[in-house]
Every structure is written in C-alpha cells, then in structure tokens.
Image: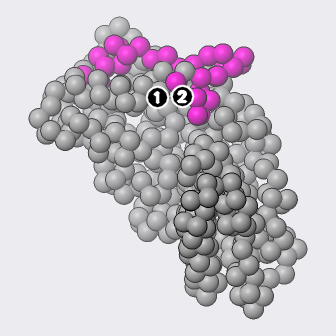
Amino acid sequence: MNKEVLDYPTLMEHLVSLPTFSIVTGGRAGSDFLQSVFDSHPEVLTFNGWFQFHELFWNESYCVKTENFELSDLVDEFIGKLIYKLKSRYDIQEKKDKLGLDNNQSIDIDLKEFKKHVLCLMQNVSINSKNILTVITASYALCLKQDLFEKKIILHHPHLAEYLQSHIADFPNTKLIYMVRDPRANIVSGYENFGKYYPDKSGAALLNAYLTSILYEDISIVTGTQLEYRILRVEDLDQKEVYLKLCDWMGINYCETMTSSTWAGLLWHGDRLTRNKVDGLSRDVLKNNWQNKLSNSDKYIISHLTKNMRQYYKYEEEDIKTSKFKAFFIIIKPLSYEIDNIFRNINSAAKSNKTMRRLYNFYFYFVRVRLFYKLLFSPVTFDNKDYVLRK
C-alpha cells in the first residue's frame, strides 16, 4: 500500500468486505490479554483494547442525538471523549501509560492525522454506527503505519456479554470468541479487582452480579445468539498449539508476534492490578490464590454448582465429592465475601448509614441464595459439541 497517497474508496471497500470476530468474556478471564497478542499481527485489524462503542460513545453522542450533524464534529467529539484510547498516557487504569520494555512509553496517535483518515474513509459512505466503528479502527491502524490491505479480519472487543446485542446489530455475522477461566479463580479475581477499581461499588450487589454473570448468564447469552463461536480458556494462552487452532479457525496465519502482549506494538505488562507480568505467554499471570481466599464451604458449593461447566471446559476435577443433599444446606451459609460485606465492612460505615447498608447487603444475600438454589435444581447444561480450543 502506498504510504503517501491512499486510495480511500478502494480501502473502504476492502474494509467492509472483511469478516469480523468479537471477543467476549464472563468476569475477569483474559480477554484483554487475548486481544493484546493479536495487536501486532499483520493480518488482524483491531483497536486499542476493549470497547463498548455504542455504550461508551454512539448512544451518548450529542452529535448523533441531533440527527443533523457534521461528521467533523462527530470525530472531534470522539477524540474528546475517548482521548485515552488515542493517547494512552491517560489510560492509567489499564497501565497503558507504562508500555514498552522500560515501562516508559505510551501510544501517541497524531490526532490531526487520525481525523483526516476518518473523514477521507467516510467520503460517500453512510454515516452509521457500523461504518464509524470500522473507520475509527482503520484510522487508528493507519496512524500506526499498518498496511490495511494486508488485513484479513477485523477483531472487535465488546468485552462483556451484556453488550453483545448492540454490537451484533451492526455485525450480525460476526463470530465470537468467548473467554473463560476456572470459575473459582474468576470469582475471586473479578470481585476483588473490580472492587479495587471502583471501591464505592464494591459490596454484596457486586458479588451477586459476578456470580450471576460467571455461573449462569454470560454463556447463555453467547449460545443464545446462534452465532458461530469458540470457547477459549485463559489457562491455555501459553500454548502455541491453541493459537494455531485459533488462527486456523479465524482464517489467518500464525505469527510470532503472538508470543508477546502489546498495544500499538509496545510491550504491555498488564493493567495496574495485575501482580504478575504478562509480557509473553505465562501461566503466572493467573495466580490469585483463590484456594486460600475461598472458604472450604465456598469451594464446595461453587465446585458443585459448576460441575457441568468445568467438565465442559475440560478443567481437571479436584478430589471433592459433592452431593445435592449436602449442597442444599451449604447454600444457606454466607459466603466468605458475604460475611465481609454484611458484618465486617458494615462496621466502618457512618452510624446513620449502617442500618440501610446492612439491609441492602442482606437483601443481596437472599438474592444469591435464590440464585444458588436455582442452579442446584436447574443446573446450566452444555451440549457435547467440541467448541473448546485446547490441546
């Protein structure tokens, strides 16, 4: 591709012809890590990290709401609202202000060039959410001097299953990659890390949301789309054979760049809550000591309720003999995190708020008990199709 004079109409025709793949996950299961290993792949067109385009931008856009706007204004609005996607020194949460070998680099997109590419690609093209997202992704790559004619697929990252419907409305033929993790490690990582990001939202409601998402809801949303999908365990992301299978399914070649985790070609060491580096393919990033953070009764009941799930995802079985009769009574016992929410953390609240917070947390304790009984008597079932990519 000529780097000086771009044939934007031909380039746009190429972009809209590319098949799309979309990464989704339940809880904290390595979807960012997976996207980052495709970041430097010459045949993959992708944006900077997870991106709920409709929810973060399109649906809230002042320009879009007027239904009569200048495209130039829309681009300016995007840059202003999501500057951290283009200038990653502002993305402290994902630790993209400390990229590179020495943790001292960041993504620095030329904003004038980015805007120029968007406007040129959108010439004589309908202004809608699908085209704008495609062009934003392409313009980002052009600023990084990537050859877009070499791209074979577009990789989106709507991230959570709850955002799938708006994404699928634009890309009804997208194929899905659903990231999973051992449910016990996932619960611990998701609950504790989200609570560190947003301490004001930490509590019984957050715990219940994670339990619902990981144990029940997200896989049902994915399978309910009727789209072609593959399930990928984050625990397998250090195995080249898994990447070879994944690339074959996606219609691209395996590339050695997939041995490193990068954003805009700069080495990524994980978000600010990641204790272990994710520079390459390593299981160390997954260690979160869930075995000691969950009580014996927690592990017993979660192991029982996720038996079908763990067998389907082909996790090794522990030497835990569970029974429905015993599980029936253990469900009533508060989980270790619930004890913290109901009894310990409540004591640090202001006196006037203690009663309301205690009632609030007790309410979600009963919501959790109801969910667990639902899973006990109507367990989530999995078909026998071999969707799981692993050795």
Q: Residues within 10 Å of mark 1 (few under 14, many from 20)?
A: many
Q: To which residue does mark 1 refer?
A: 85
Q: Quadrant of the C terminus?
A: bottom right
Q: Is residue 375 above or below residue 52?
A: below
Q: Please identify the dominant SS of the magenta region.
A: loop
Marks 2 and 1: in contact by CB < 8 Å?
Answer: yes
Is 198 drawn above or below residue 376 in the view shown? Answer: above
Real-space CA distance between mark 1 and mark 2, rounded to the nearest whole angstrom: 7 Å
| Residue 287 position within the rendered picture, expressed as x and y whole percent measured from the top left | 79, 48
Residue under label 2 = 91
Along the viewing direction, whichever of 36 and 295 lies nearer the viewer: 295
Q: Is residue 134 magenta?
A: no
- Mark 2 lies on a secondary structure that is loop
How far across and down, in percent of the image, does residue 228 sit? 46, 60
**207 vs 264: above or below:** below
What segment carries the magenta color? 90-119
Q: Is residue 44 above or below residue 114?
A: below
Quadrant into which the N terminus falls: top left
- Front of the two marks 1 and 2: 2
Which element carries disc 1, helix, strand or loop? helix
Residue type, label 2:
Asp
Left or right: where 379 falls relative to 333: left
Residue occupying the point 64% across, 35% down: 271
Give the residue drawn at x 66%, y 34%.
Answer: 272
Kindly give the residue lying farthest to the front in the view shown: 351
Q: Residue at x 66, y 71 (%)?
A: 309
Point out residue 102 in the picture as x, y percentages from the top left corner.
72, 16
Q: Is residue 249 visible?
A: no
Residue 100 appearing in the image:
yes
- Does 299 sit left or right of 59 as displayed? right
Q: Amino acid at mark 1?
A: Lys
